[in-house]
Image (cartoon, rainbow, N blue to C red):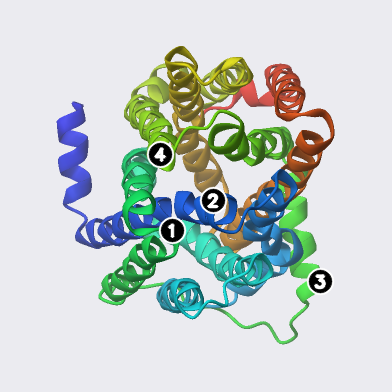
Amino acid sequence: MSDRTERTTLLHHKEFVRFWVADTVSLAGTHVTTLALKAVAVLTLGATATEAGVLEAARWLPYLLFGLVAGALLDRRRRLPVLVGTDLARAAVLALIPLAAFTGTLTMPLLIGLVLVFGTLSLFYDAAHQSFLPLLVPTERLTDANARLEQTRSAAQGLGPLVGGALVKFIGGPPAVLVDAVSYLVSGLVLATLRTPERPVEAPAKRDLRGEVREGLRWVYRHEVLRPLALGSHAWFLFASMVTAVYTVLVLDELGFDAFLFGVTFAVGGVGGLLGASLSGPVGRRFGVGPVIVAARWLTPVGYALVPLATSSTTGFVLLCAAQFVFMLSAILDSPVEMAYRQSITPDRLMGRMNATTRSVNRGMIVFGALLGGALADWLGNRPALWIAVVGLLGTALGMTCSAVRRARL
């Protein structure tokens, strides 16, 4: 079946198309704000590497604190109202950032607090988002549907920081955050038009939240393939987030590149991600889920090893762009096949818990990684902290290679 036919088949699922549109609008704003918040912290509020790490950690801390409970709660109710409500709430929270800046009350503690609330809302949205997709397309189209969403994500990761860098440079960071607030508002309104029927949620005679959480944990961590896949992903997020925390300070402070060029590196990364999303479906069908995941995990340290080699010269800037390109290629290449695999083997009644368990611990690792990366950078220097992260990513790739993941098939 040709790639054109696959796209046409997906486009025949009108509810998926609207879901895709909402996701596209939301992601476009998100990646503008991702850069804008970092620039506000470092350039406007003078954040140190440790403070930048705390800000990054605040975005993902709710996943660590509430992720397991969120999955169990989500499996008790319809997912679409959760998607709509959290989108609208996130729009309101982000709008408070430029308001605080306009009134002169924006500080690092306030910024971290608002990002913490935003992260809590995103936790519930993400778990519902991943659990809702299997209702929109047949199982045999899950890899392609996830690939289309990842293509959009990659384009947003490329163009969003580029636009965000330009906005920060010309109008400042806080006003740029308004773009994301509007994008969440539009996304919520589009999602509200979906009419996909959801299964009735059966209420047992007695709810056992702790037991439901344990059931989700058992499914993920006792499964022959899901267990090493989850553990390997946790380690990957830990070390990759160490690089992310240090990268902002290295590029904007130590190397002295401006916000626009900072955004250009992410734009080049978006091209790599777009390529990875385009290749994911075909190579997944050709080689299988496991080999694609393993190969992608080896690509990540290859890309990030270029970051500590960068200088403030043109060659150094090219190295930063190449690092982001290879990293995003690796991150997005395996994402659709991995997600489709997890969605296809998980019973619907466990879908929310499976997604929330895996995602929450992954995001929890971002908390530790961001804090660890920032602390190591302030203690040892930016480049030694980056090399430690690269070595950790190499160990993660080796562990995945030696696990049952390499034999996984959809």
Determine which residue is flagged by label 1. 173
Instruction: State the image coordinates of residue 384 (x, y, percent, origin top left).
Output: 76, 23
Which picture quadrant has residue 24?
bottom left
Determine which residue is flagged by label 2. 43
Instruction: State the image coordinates of residue 246 (x, y, percent, origin top left).
Output: 66, 36
Determine which residue is flagged by label 3. 210
Identity of the residue drawn at 35% across and 47% down: 160
**First-in-chain label (4 vs 1):** 1
Q: Secondary structure at mark 2?
A: helix
Q: Residue furthest bottom?
A: 205
Observer-side mark, 2 or 1, equals: 2
Looking at the rendered structure, the kind of residue marked 1 is Gly
Q: Residue furthest right?
A: 379
Observer-side mark, 2 or 3, equals: 2
Viewer-proximal residue among 27 and 123: 27
Viewer-proximal residue among 139 and 284: 284
On residue 254, the disc is none
Looking at the rendered structure, the kind of residue marked 2 is Leu
Which picture quadrant has residue 77?
bottom right
Q: Quadrant of the N terminus?
A: top left
Looking at the rendered structure, the kind of residue marked 3 is Arg
